[in-house]
Image (cartoon, rainbow, N blue to C red):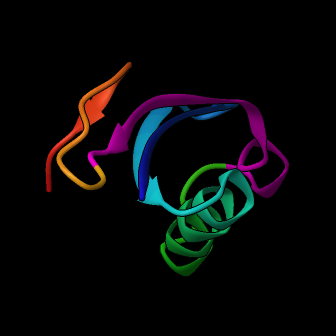
Amino acid sequence: MKLFKIENGIGTYWVVAEHPTQAEEKLKTILDANDYGFSDKRKAVTITVIAEVVENNYLTGKFLVL
């Protein structure tokens, strides 16, 4: 799992997912279900990996402890 920072025309969001496309879909699903903002503004403009889950107790780079 990874922590992604997703920026779109509505704001900045933090999503935990395996892949960037999965993170974008999770966010879009919530925004669509709540009819939040204009639909054309819900599309991700930037997706950035902020941290990754520690695997096998091996700490390197950006850490995400779940």
**With respect to residue 41, does 35 lie above or below?**
below
**With respect to residue 23, does 61 lie above or below?**
above
**Is 4 on the left-hand or right-hand side of 19?**
left
Q: Residue at x 71, y 49 (%)?
A: 42
Asked whether 49 falls inside the magenta stretch, the response is yes
Asked whether 26 falls inside the magenta stretch, the response is no
**Is 46 on the left-hand or right-hand side of 30?**
right
Percent position of residue 24, x then y: 66, 56
Front position in the image: 53 or 40: 53
Q: Residue at x 65, y 67 (%)?
A: 22
Front position in the image: 22 or 61: 61
**Is 54 on the left-hand or right-hand side of 43?**
left
Percent position of residue 2, x then y: 44, 49
Q: Which residues are magenta?
A: 38-54
Q: Say which quarter of the image contains residue 62.
A: top left
**With respect to residue 44, does 66 lie above or below?**
below
Give the position of the N terminus as an image quadrant: bottom left
Q: Residue at x 76, y 42 (%)?
A: 41
Front position in the image: 53 or 59: 59
Give the position of the C terminus as an image quadrant: bottom left
Q: Say which quarter of the image contains residue 59.
A: top left
